[in-house]
Amino acid sequence: MFVRKKKNRSGTTSIVVAVKVKGKFKEIKTVGIARDEAEIERLYKEGKLWVDNHANGVDLFQQHTREKEEALVTNMLLSTIENILHNGTQLILNRVYDSIGYDAIDDYILRQLVISRLSQLMSKSATVEYLKSHFDEDLQLDKIYRYMDKLYNTQQESIQKISVEHTRKVLGMASTANPR
């Protein structure tokens, strides 16, 4: 913002507060109109005072530094919120995992794979990166592939049984352990 003296066709001078936007002047406030030099100077000083009060007397260099600091703080806060969102999802899904009954299978890798794949559907390789970057879990991709064989060969039946029992419970049907 700056104060501008603008000559009028009538011979008067308008004192206006203006800004330059995209190469064009935009008037924000008309301070006043005068003919004599003393009045023009008085209005000009009044305009300067108005600019100082409305621009809060901010030094542009200090403002730029403050904006950079605010951007850093904002980015830090947003990344914290993002981590809270990831952790919140993880906490909720851990409770769901337990309430279904999968906690009966005492296998940490199964828990991590199920919960991470539910919260962030992605490839096994991307899941490894997701767990590393957000939860500091150090699962190796080859370990996951070996685990998939174990899951198929030894845990598939128990997982299916827990899933069927939970589904029956949710639907209000009798358990397979207690037929009607």
Image (tube, helix red, strand yellow):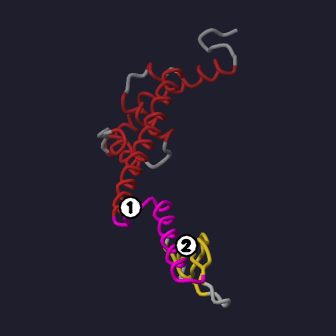
* Foreground residue among 154 and 105: 105
Is residue 65 placed above or below 169 in the rendered structure?
A: below
* Tag of residue 148: none
Q: Are marks 2 and 1 in contact (CB under 8 Å)?
A: no
Q: Identify residue for label 1.
A: 63
Q: Amino acid at mark 2?
A: Val
Residue 56: % across, % down: 45, 59
> Who's the residue at 57% across and 82% down the image?
24
Q: Residues within 10 Å of mark 2 (few under 14, many from 20)?
A: many
SS for tag 2?
strand
Residue 100: % across, % down: 54, 22
* Tag of residue 17: 2
> Who's the residue at 38% across and 22% down the image?
106
Query: Which tag, 2 or 1, sits closer to the chain's start?
Result: 2
SS for tag 1?
helix
* Foreground residue among 10 and 142: 10
Say whether residue 136 is left or right of residue 55. Answer: left
Residue 156 counted in the magenta span:
no
Of circles 2 and 1, the one toward us is 2
Range of magenta residues: 35-61
Quadrant in which the C terminus appears: top right
Residue 36 counted in the magenta span:
yes
Say whether residue 174 is left or right of residue 67. Answer: right
Q: Amino acid at mark 1?
A: Gln
Is residue 6 placed above or below 168 in the rendered structure?
A: below
Magenta portion: prevailing SS class? helix
Q: Residues within 10 Å of mark 1 (few under 14, many from 20)?
A: few
Residue 145: % across, % down: 36, 43
* Foreground residue among 10 and 120: 10
